[in-house]
Image (cartoon, helix red, strand yellow):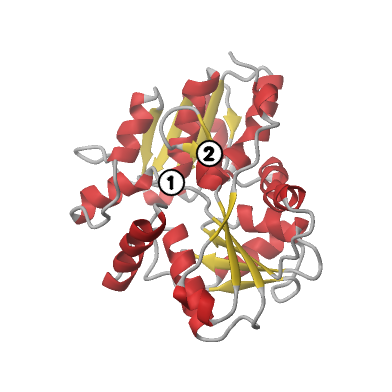
Amino acid sequence: MPAISSLLEHAPSPLEPIVLPAFEDAVLSVLIKRDDLLRMGPDLALCGNKWRKLKYNLAAAQSAGEQQLLTFGGAFSNHIAAVAGAGVAFGFKTTGVIRGEAPQALNPTLRFAKDCGMHLHFVSRSAFRQKDDPHFLAKLQQDFGPFYHLPEGGTNELALEGTREIVKETIQQHPSLQVDYWCVSAGTGGTAAGMILQAAPQSKVLVFSALKGDFLKHDIEGLTGRQAGTGWDLITDFHFGGYARYRPELIGFLNDFYQKYGIALDPVYTGKLFFGLATLARQGYFPKGSTVVAVHTGGLQGVDGFNERFGGLLHYAP
């Protein structure tokens, strides 16, 4: 099994300017933190915030002599794909507990996970809600043997240690950079929480929720101990209905962004983040002269599944 500790100190992901008309008109300096280029293991699965969340967990599992990783997720989960990819890269057996009944045909995410050797264990939605119950976890251990438990989305204390490095690394790259706003998309809130804990007091972290509702406010407060409005805000206007939901204007924005910059955005997380950021800029949300750093958290393994499901809406090069 390769030593994970040797990979924990990796080259920083690039920081690049993005010049959209909306940003120019609002007199903003907007930079994109290219964590999508922070890739380990097979394909695009173990990249971005998934690598940052997993790397210290993988090192802990390896140090403890664990042979198996077990985690939870939906059928299109970036986290499921990342854990499966980590199994191949670092020699772990992997089990994914998948929400919902087994489909007749696997989507690209689940095909990738299975090809990586992950055992897919499908459970009902009611059973899936027990994912944090000690008795349910004990039953899984009885069924599948000892495992290192990774929660849905990968968010735990070791994950926060990894996601804090987004801010730390950016400042180390550009010590003179004065960031007014950090922007990041969120599903479980782990990446956002790490950034909130690391950001300087004069900066604000804007968390763009990929899901309907404001429940993430409570979740992030639990992870950080900070009330919304104290160094961060939750933006809930750009979820487009939730996971795998979209409108034509979002698809047009994503294809145009790719044509102009050669940067693919995923339609579930980062696409909504940048669409929302451009909209807020047009609305005058940001004071003129603000410096904004937006994080591309990856998620690109999900593009194939989205296109397969909705008929090739995203026109990205292979």
* Spot occupied by residue 112 in the image (x, y as percentages of width and height): 34, 32
> Residue 83 vs residue 15: left or right?
left
The reply to whether dot 1 and dot 2 touch (C-beta < 8 Å) is: yes
- Residue 93 visible at all: no
Q: Quadrant of residue 266?
A: bottom left
Give me the C-alpha separation between circle 1 and circle 2.
9 Å
Image: 211 above or below 258: below
Mark closest to the chain's N terminus, 1 or 2: 1
Label 1: few (<14), some (14–19) or many (≥20) C-alpha neighbours in 10 Å: few
> Which residue has dot 1 on it?
127
Residue at the top extreme, as displayed: 1
Instruction: Specify the amino acid type for callout 1.
Output: Ala
Residue at 28% over, 39% down: 102
- Residue 126 visible at all: yes
Instruction: Specify the amino acid type for callout 2.
Output: Phe
Q: Could you tell me which quadrant the N terminus lies in?
A: top right
- Of 89 and 103, the residue lying toward us: 89
* Spot occupied by residue 68 in the image (x, y as percentages of width and height): 54, 22
Image: 149 above or below 275: above
Image: 100 above or below 121: below
Label 2 sits on a secondary structure element that is helix
* Spot occupied by residue 46 in the image (x, y as percentages of width and height): 50, 36
- Of 201 and 289, the residue lying toward us: 289
> Residue 110 vs residue 225: left or right?
left
Q: Quadrant of residue 5?
A: top right
Q: Could you tell me which quadrant the C terminus lies in?
A: top left
Label 2: few (<14), some (14–19) or many (≥20) C-alpha neighbours in 10 Å: some
Label 1 sits on a secondary structure element that is helix
> Which residue has dot 2 on it?
136
Residue at the right extreme, as displayed: 201
